[in-house]
Image (tube, rainbow, N blue to C red):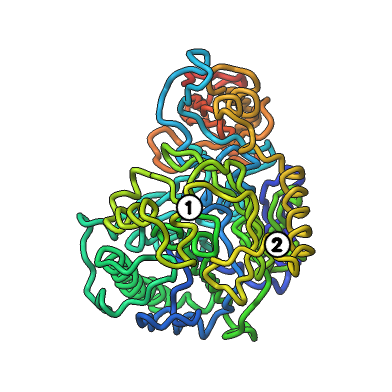
Amino acid sequence: MIRCVGALLTGMAVTASGAAEPIAAEGDAPLPNLVWLSVEDMSPWLPCYGDSTVATPNIDRLAKSSVRYANAFATSPVCAPARSSLITGMYATAIGSMHHRVGSGRARLSSGADVRPKYEAVPPPFVRCFPELLRRAGYYCTNNSKTDYQFKAPATVWNESSPRAHWKNRPAGAPFFAVFNYEGTHESQAFPRAKRRPEVIAASDVPLPPFYPDTPAVRDGMARTYNNIAAMDAWVGERLEELQESGLLDNTIVFFFSDHGVGLPRGKRSLYDTGTRVPLLIRIPDSDRAGETDTRVVSFIDFAPTVLSLARIEPDQRLNGVPFLGPFERPGTGLAFAHADRFDEVYDRARSVTNGRYRYVRNYDVDMPYLLRNAYRENLPMTADLYALAEGGAERPAQWQIAAQTRVAEELYDSASDPWEVRNLADDADHQAMLADLRSKLDQWIEQTGDLGLITPESKMIRERLWNGADAQPTTSPPRCEYRNGRLAVSCEMEGASLGYRNTGDKAWQVYDGPVKADPGQRLQVLAHRIGFKPVRTEYRVPSAQRRQPVSSD
């Protein structure tokens, strides 16, 4: 159930169906604006996290007025599965979005047991992309502009989603939730064909993790990564300046974070800290916690319920995540789980859990190297040097994960004494209690969340768990329209369908949350879309007589 706290919500309440409606309330504070500054492929390699390799003055200023989260983690070390968790508050392994890129073919499952068709994740019916719930409560929601959720987002999720989407386009006085995504730190921006940012640090001066060989290509990859971070800092400053100049910074909660760890080998696509630990700064105006460090373990599954809580909307308690801020804040588990599954064309199957200090990793397929051969990653020149190291053998103990051609079934690391996670303690006698505890916690998580990634082959998971035994993607039931007493009511017999409407010719869809006023002869388009199913649109002409009159469906 979604409901709002009437005592805190300005002029709005939520009915049992989740629809927002005006109420009378005295002394209510205005709803806060919310902004996400999301950057790609970046570990906490920032001065505010103790890495002074390059200066980031704008992020430093933001950190001084924010709470810095020391133990924030992505649910996946690659973007699309992680983003599906951000937008839904659910683990990708629970909704079928854990495989990076959910199919490249259009074949039907009946054409072969191992055929991987184009498909979409299918969350439980109670799950919505959370900006849709914000829109019901009166928020203007914009996304600029990456989605990549592993499913087609219903048209009701955003007021705008494009490179031009901006909170400045909202109606006067409306509270807003705005996402801005920066791609300049993405893995691809270290490819040879990518634009080089101004050199802030030379390749000869860049620090190297202990698991990398010291080669020109490796140094160039590291230097480009840090130089891209320096360029990103200017972008952060521009976004904050926009809010400041508009007089909105003091009523805007700002999140700054990365979608997963650094976009270099053994960062992106790996379950270690370098792949899953992310920076997270949250600036709440007039907070007495500005400049503090929060050591709680928080995960991407917690972001959606936390934003809803900050907007004074109670999140559905069936979500995997819990709100860690706002009036509906609840205690978390103190654990962050992550998964590694298919990365483009190559399969992996591993799971991990961390309590912020100790990390447990379980490898299901031990007869494969740690350094998977991924065609996209091979655009990084340094990858060839790592392959050479794997073929020639490790030069020092810290490189064993790069060189190993097979995996161990279990790994355990202490990030306090071993921040790069290169000393496996799984066989250490002094750490057997911690190993057993985290092993048990992972087993419980897999069972409680119904880990779909352990169903193989992928086609079996699609057919049996996403498509309910069918051979093709299911379609949402069509919306039903009924016009009575000057108002149009829309319904759908399919549980979990998002409903929307717009005037024929309009671009933006409105979220349907109750009968809407309509005039005789008016033409409307009506939408029903359950996530993971094909959407259905109906054009409806309001009759002059009291009868229903659908015109066409697609």
Residue 27, compared with residue 81, is above or below; it is below
Label number found at residue 137: none
Label number found at residue 335: 2
Q: Amino acid at mark 2?
A: Leu
Mark positioned earlier in the residue sequence (1 or 2): 2
- Which of these two is toward me, 90 or 196? 196
User: Could you tell me which residue is drawn at 36 percent across and 82 percent down?
Assistant: 55
User: Could you tell me which residue is drawn at 24 percent across and 67 percent down?
Assistant: 216
- Which of these two is toward me, 305 or 134? 305
Q: Quick one: SS at disc 1?
A: loop
Q: Is residue 101 left or right of residue 380?
A: right
Q: CA distance from mark 1 to mark 2?
A: 28 Å
Residue 302 in percent (x, y) is at 65, 59
Q: Is residue 151 left or right of residue 487?
A: left
Task: Identify the image quadrant of residue 323.
Answer: bottom right
- Which of these two is toward me, 491 or 396? 396
Residue to which mark 1 is pinned? 404
Residue 509, compared with residue 442, is above or below; it is above
User: Could you tell me which residue is drawn at 53 percent across and 18 percent down?
Assistant: 113
Q: Is residue 312 visible?
A: no
Q: Amino acid at mark 1?
A: Ala
